[in-house]
Image (cartoon, coloured by chain):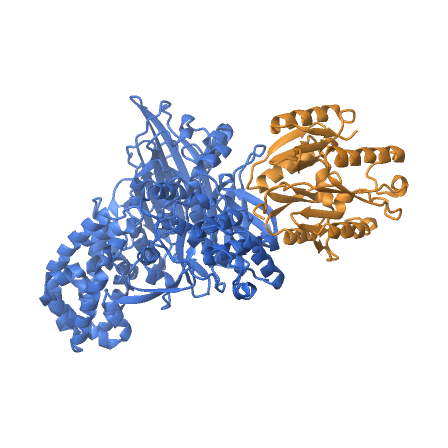
Amino acid sequence: MAGLMAGFGHYTHAVVRGIPASLAKEALRSSQTEVDLAKAVKEQEAYVEVLRTRLGLEVVELPADESLPDCVFVEDAAVVCGDTALITRPGAESRRGETEAMKGALKDLNLNIVEMTDENATLDGGDVLFTGREFFVGLSKRTNQRGAEILADAFKDYAVSTVPVLEGLHLKSFCSMGGPGLIVIGSSEPAQKALKIMQQMSDHRYDKLTVPDDLAANCIYMNLPSKGHVLLHCTAEEFPESAKESLNACSSQFASPCRVFIS
Amino acid sequence: MTTEAGSETEVKEKAEESAAEPDQSEKATEDSQEVANAEVEEKERAKVKEKEGKEGKGISRYLPTWLKKQKSQSQTSPTKEDPPTEEPVSEVTQEEEGPTPEVNGHAEEVEEKEEVKSEQVKEKEAETHSNASADTEPAKEEKVEESAEKSPEETKETTEGEGAEEETKEKEGAVEAEGEAGEGQTSIFQSPLRLVRKNKMKLVVCHVTLLDGTDFTCEVEKRAKGQYLFFKVCEHLNLLEKDYFGLTYKDNHDQKCWLDPTKEIKRQIRSNNWQFAFNVKFYPPDPSLLTEDITRYLLCLQLREDVASGRLPCSFVTHALLGSYTLQAEIGDYEPDQPRPLDFISQLTFAPNQNKEMEEKILELYKSHRGMTPAQADTQFLENAKKLSMYGVDLHHAKDSEGVDIMLGVCANGLLVYKDRLRINRFAWPKILKISYKRNNFYIKIRPGETEQFESTVGFKLENHRAAKRLWKVCVENHSFFRLNAPEPPTKARFLTLGSKFRYSGRTQAQTRMASSLIDRPAPSFERTSSKRISRSLDGAPMISITEAGRESAENGREPHLELHSDSKVTVVDVSPGDAEAMPSQHSPGSSELGPPQSSLRVHGDNIYVRHSNLMLEDHDKTQEEVLKHQASISQLKRSFMEAPPPSPPQPNQWEKRLTSSPATIRLQQQQVVSVPQTEAATADNAISDTKEPAKPPVVKTEMVTISDTFAAQKTEIATKEVPIVHTETKTITYEAAQLDGNGDGEPGVLMTAQTITSESLCTTTTTHITKTLKGGLSETRIEKRIVITGDCDIDHDQALAQAIKEAKEQHPDMSVTRVVVHKETELAEED
């Protein structure tokens, strides 16, 4: 237990959820582009493959639920830090049901479950950025102050600062952690503004990695017992420029560079 | 000692007197020496006394005097601890003497003897004091001077009431003592209170709750300063790294307050409850840097308390972990055969919501610590505790500008703003230019961001004035401790202390680290006590994460100093930097407001603490423009001064018709004001002087008062308060020092800023004038600040002056105050 509050700890498990057919038509959308369901399924398979095979994580796959078109976005249903899992209360009503399955899965992993029961609270996991030292919670269309307060109560050891998310869906729509002390941030104005706020609010200093595309700033950093630092980021085909940045950052940041693409 | 002690009190009295008798003040003004102040005062005092004498020396008359005279400077430092032992003696003597109804007779006799004595005493004192912590206690010096100069008459007067009790006197002779005793008797019998007062050496029993929950009792002289008691406690604890700690007491409103080491305890507690608590005041951001285990142990005790009481929130796991280290430190290795360990654990308090589950977890973790020494366990405890987000954060309830409840957290890095448990804003020290409070409002002026042009001021509402002041003080102390390398250069320090009278008087973290690195003693053995304690409440101490000064400055490119000010008075401060290094900004004269001159904007607020930091680098850019702006506004100001009488009551332009009467209280020295020149002659100029040489003021004849320390200020203020009239006061403080700096250019000087703040009955104007001159390779920067405060009787002038000086010092630590000029103008209705 000496490792309490030891930054990111070690990553051992990953929870994913199947893609329901309803995703294409019924899921909440912020843009009107068509969803290529088949491609989505394929991408997810590749993703799970990487997690399981290449990274050696124990992957918990939850079945898709057709009545929950957005259920594939598991990030929003829970926030796990240390041995505590906060089951969120998603901002979109249609997504509230997603937490059930997630709660069950996390319980099975022996995490201490904290539920957000306050009906005035909303919180999407996508608005929660954990830096290893503290939390930033985006106050967005999906997350409100009350939700952030409950998160602060659930993780009392850490400072929880709020960051207004004026554009985009979630805080993590344009940023994420690229490693200990490294924030990957998009270059759009809202993203840069949010970064400024985060820097001002923090007692810690973060390096930043600015990528050309906001969407490409959404990465997954993991500290794996067997592989060390791993950054899971977008493919070069998707965002060539951003991918390059990530690569460079990766290699300079970590002694043993490891990068994984979702192909 | 006796005599000097009386000064404060006397001032007040005088003030009253002066109010009543304006003519006195005139006489006072006639003096024109540097020492004038003191002399004047003395005279006045003498007058007052004479008056008193005429009116009768009834016992009752002495009462107030005694009360106040109590504050002598004995026991300023721990080294002077001996006196207490002597005290009892004098007491006894007095008590033995029978009550004597006839006070007068005795008094007279005593007086005669006393004269001689007191003079000697004074001299001695003067010496002592000058050596003593001059910087922390500027006031003392003044007192000393005064006392030394007192005329025999005064002495008599003073001594009448006080009688004897000084150690010195005792040494001088039994005879005297007797006489005094006789005198004392009267008062004793008159009222018990008096008895106490009369014996200056009276001891009081203090109860100090230590971090382990035990009570430490010790006796201190009633007039002892906070640090005396604090040192006693540290001595008892065998603690050397004491700068992180402090004593708290509860004020009348049951609020925890830090005992100011530089002030008399008695005057702070304001009640007869000599009950204190020993607490961590500045939480070291990195406890592993502490030198001694005993210090870490004490810090652990404080944190256990903080955690158990919920003041330092932490998660279940953290509670368990911290608890397990506590067990390891307190009881050593887990013994498998120990019967029912859980029962034992449940008797201890580890968390606010401790339950069985947590206790089991604690036990489980505790078992894993086998082999860890107590010191190692403490270290582990601290390593985990220091990471908690609220570690070292001192929270204060407040409301934002929209009336929303928030919490302001003061810590090592700056000021944090919380709404419920969420951090909604953060102002790192480097971002804060100034901190002030006014009534129940607390303000911080924020340095403009990269893209912003102007500074902004953020205001918060505290529950009341006291709360605002308390918050302000905590900010001042935390900023000083964590952000500065040294509180202030000693030289300046000895000059004056602040008007609000408050500033951080201890060592900074940097200094204490340095000091503790020199600790050379075998690790003291100390006994760990059971960790079973109930949470007591303390107010959280300030500070948290560390910010090394160096790192921060690097971070922001700014220097750490802030200025403090209080405004309610007019004060002009001249600062000239002595060394170039400290003031990088000097390179670009005129550049930003920050330049050496710094943020000269003054504010309003009862007290202002401004960090003037270094900003130079960053500020440069905006400089030119800003300067121009400021200049513009200044000339505007001047114009307005000249043109018409300003709004509120008294205004600067009354200078022209000013009278020089100054309330008796102030010792004035008639001098010429130095001011200047620049463009418009009128009022404004007086304030500004460009070069070191004080030019004579073109205008009016004003009275100038040179105040060498705060004390004087205090007196003044008192006087003013009592006076029902409206007056205007102007004070000029000059800091000067030669500075080496290649860049000097004989620039005439630029007015950096001018600000007029008007509120209700007060009007404050601050003008800062910066001049750089180059003389034979020596560049000198001189900053003169002029603060004009106008208002009616409610202004606390002395305080304002003191504050201004303090501020100036803080603002320009590398410069010294070379001159303080005070003009005090009072418009008397009667006079013309």
**Total numbered circles:** 0
Q: Nearer the viewer, residue B375 or B282?
A: B375
**Residue B181 in view of the camera:** yes
**Residue B829 in view of the camera:** no
Whether B347 is drawn above or below A177: the answer is: below
**Is B442 left, or right, of B274 in this rendering?**
right
Q: Nearer the viewer, residue B651 or A50?
A: A50
**Is B466 left, or right, of B207 in this rendering?**
right
Estimate the x, y position of residue B707 in percent, counting from the top left. 28, 46
Q: Nearer the viewer, residue B236 or B333?
A: B333
Estimate the x, y position of residue B359 in percent, counting from the top left. 58, 61
Q: Nearer the viewer, residue A231 or A3?
A: A3
**In the figure, what tint was chain A given?**
orange
Q: Quadrant of the N terminus of chain B?
A: bottom left
Which quadrant holds residue B575? top left
**In the figure, what tint was chain B given?**
blue
Which quadrant holds residue A166? top right
Looking at the image, which residue sits at the far front? B337
Estimate the x, y position of residue B576 in percent, counting from the top left. 34, 34
Estimate the x, y position of residue B286 in percent, counting from the top left. 47, 44
> Residue, x 23% and y 74% (percent of image)?
B188
Whether B263 is drawn above or below B564: the answer is: below
